[in-house]
Amino acid sequence: MEFESPYTLERIKNPSEDLQTDLWNRLHEFSVSKLGDPSMEKKEFFAILIKEGETLIAASLCYLFFKGLNLQLLWVAEEKRGMDLGTKLLKQIEVEALELGATLVFGYSFGFQAPKFYTKLGYEEVGKIPNYPEGQNCFFLCKKLDSDPT
């Protein structure tokens, strides 16, 4: 695609962390201005790790924005699956989300990954991309958090 001067189009492979942060900040600032609610300004990107000694055996990446926690990934080492590490990690993610003021956790899982793991733990399928990747489905999942579990 060509742009008329003074515009240029540039593709950057593996954009720097600084560039990513700048772009997310620009979008967040615009979005918060449209929401009109200062309580929506809080955002945080973090990881939760489970280690055995110095060996990483489970981990998650999470991004909090607009009072929702986007679970970007949850991973458990193959040899440690079936030991409830994923469940414990997800429950800790939910605790962290509540402490940060989130009202829900959302993310996605492919059919060959673990959508049933999430639904078993109270997540609801809220959308699906059929046949993505080819021969599979991509499930969008969400769980509303109860700040008073009693």
Image (tube, rainbow, N blue to C red):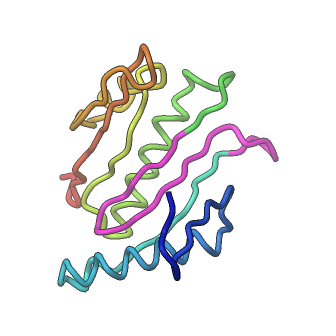
Q: Is residue 97 left or right of residue 145?
A: right
Q: Is residue 49 magenta?
A: no
Q: Residue furthest front?
A: 4
Q: Position of residue 87 (x, y in %)?
A: 46, 35
Q: Quadrant of residue 148?
A: bottom left
Q: Is residue 130 above or below residue 99?
A: above
Q: Position of residue 91 (x, y in %)?
A: 41, 45
Q: Position of residue 100 (x, y in %)?
A: 38, 69
Q: Quadrant of residue 102?
A: bottom left
**Number of callouts:** 0
Q: Residue at x 39, y 54 (%)?
A: 70
**Closer to us: 70 or 76:** 70
Q: Is residue 66 magenta?
A: yes
Q: Is residue 55 above or below residue 83?
A: below
Dominant SS type (magenta): strand
Q: Residue at x 30, y 39 (%)?
A: 141
Q: Position of residue 16 (x, y in %)?
A: 68, 67
Q: Is residue 119 left or right of residue 150?
A: right
Q: Which residues are magenta?
A: 51-74
Q: Residue furthest right?
A: 54
Q: Quadrant of residue 22?
A: bottom right
